[in-house]
Amino acid sequence: MITISKEFDFTAEDFFDYLDKQLISAIKTARGNNLPVKLTSGTHYTQGDIDTEITNYKRGQLYEAHFKNDRLDIVISYKTININKGVKITFSEEIKSYDPSKYSSFNNWLYNFQLKHGAKKELNKMAKGVYSNMQK
């Protein structure tokens, strides 16, 4: 499992405003309709061949989702805590379909390095989206 934390100068509410907008759009597209979407723990939808379940959702605090198909099995989460200068976001990613016992320690190190790099990029991409959403 990879976990990284970073502080930003926006609030947890700003983050969830952006996240919710992205999720609602994805769910409406996946369901093929424009019906209202209520984001709660237990919400299921399918994008392409990936089954998604929001496993834990507490607006302003926590978003956790499980993505699964025949090739991958991943759980990601965003935990937010408002701080004096904004928000601290902790992003976690667990790839359940990866079995480290099947690989050498060097391969596992490299794999984890790549995951951590990807996680940092993902968190920064989300922050850019939040900033963009705030300017609208």
Image: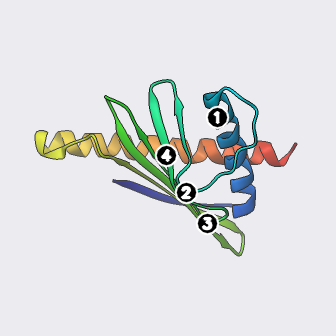
Total marks shown come to: 4
* Residue type beneath disc 2: Ser
Q: CA distance from mark 3 to mark 2?
A: 13 Å
Label 2 environment density (alpha carbons within 10 Å; few <14, some 14–19, many ≥20): some
Q: With 136 as the anchor, is 114 left or right in this view?
A: left
Label 3 environment density (alpha carbons within 10 Å; few <14, some 14–19, many ≥20): some
Q: Secondary structure at mark 3?
A: loop
Instruction: Determine which residue is flagged by label 3.
Output: 61
- Sequence-wise, the earlier of marks 1 and 2 is 1
Q: CA distance from mark 2 to mark 4?
A: 8 Å
- Sequence-wise, the earlier of marks 4 and 3 is 4
Q: Secondary structure at mark 2?
A: loop
Residue 115 image position (x, y, % from top left): 37, 43
Residue 85 image position (x, y, % from top left): 72, 70
- In this rendering, the answer to whether 87 lies above or below 97 is below
User: Circles 1 and 2: CB distance less than 8 Å?
Assistant: no
Give the residue at the far right of this rendering.
136
Q: Nearer the viewer, mark 3 or mark 1?
A: 1
Instruction: Determine which residue is flagged by label 2.
Output: 41
The reply to whether residue 9 is in sight is no
* Residue type beneath disc 3: Gln
User: Circles 4 and 3: CB distance less than 8 Å?
Assistant: no
* Residue type beneath disc 4: Glu
User: Circles 3 and 1: CB distance less than 8 Å?
Assistant: no
Instruction: Determine which residue is flagged by label 1.
Output: 26
Instruction: Determine which residue is flagged by label 4.
Output: 53
Residue 67 image position (x, y, % from top left): 44, 40
Q: Secondary structure at mark 1?
A: helix
